[in-house]
Image: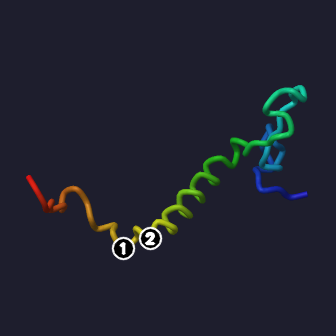
Amino acid sequence: MDGPGDPDCPICHGIGFVGYDVPMYDPRFGKSEICVCRLNSVQSLKQQHLFQLSNLGSLTELTFANFMPRGRV
């Protein structure tokens, strides 16, 4: 079975997620987290997605160096 994780990862063995072996009363019981082998790629995809949603692509040439404040001084 191919998973989203690194097949050579000693932690998740290619699944891409890890679970906790904790008692039922622990808040982490039944939950999973993204394995460290794919954490960087997930964060990068999330950042790209948020940038697309922000519609700031057309404003990339605006910086504090070329900023001209208007209004009261």
Q: Residue furthest front?
A: 72
Q: Is residue 19 left or right of residue 58?
A: right
Vertical position of residue 15 compared to residue 63: above or below = above
Number of on-image labels: 2
Q: Residue furthest bottom?
A: 58
- For image coordinates 19% across by 57% down, the residue present is 65
Disc 1 marks a residue whose amino acid type is Ser
Q: How is the image coloured?
A: rainbow
- For image coordinates 82% across by 56% down, the residue present is 3
Residue 2: horizontal and vertical position, in percent? 86, 58
- For image coordinates 87% across by 30% down, the residue present is 21
Vertical position of residue 64 compared to residue 61: above or below = above
Vertical position of residue 43 compared to residue 24: above or below = below
Q: Is there CB contact under 8 Å for labels 1 and 2?
A: yes
Secondary structure of the residue carrying tag 2 is loop
Q: Residue furthest left?
A: 73
- For image coordinates 61% across by 49% down, the residue present is 40
Viewer-closest of 51 and 26: 26
- Estimate how packed mark 2 is, as few (under 14), some (14 to 19) or many (20 or more) residues with alpha carbons within 10 Å: few
**On residue 71, which mark appears?**
none
**On residue 55, which mark appears?**
2
User: Which quadrant of the figure contains the N terminus?
Assistant: bottom right
Disc 2 marks a residue whose amino acid type is Asn
Residue behind mark 1: 58
Residue 59: horizontal and vertical position, in percent? 33, 69
Residue 9: horizontal and vertical position, in percent? 78, 43
- Estimate how packed mark 1 is, as few (under 14), some (14 to 19) or many (20 or more) residues with alpha carbons within 10 Å: few
Viewer-closest of 26 and 60: 26
Viewer-closest of 10 and 70: 70
Q: CA distance from mark 1 to mark 2?
A: 7 Å
**The quadrant where residue 61 appears:** bottom left
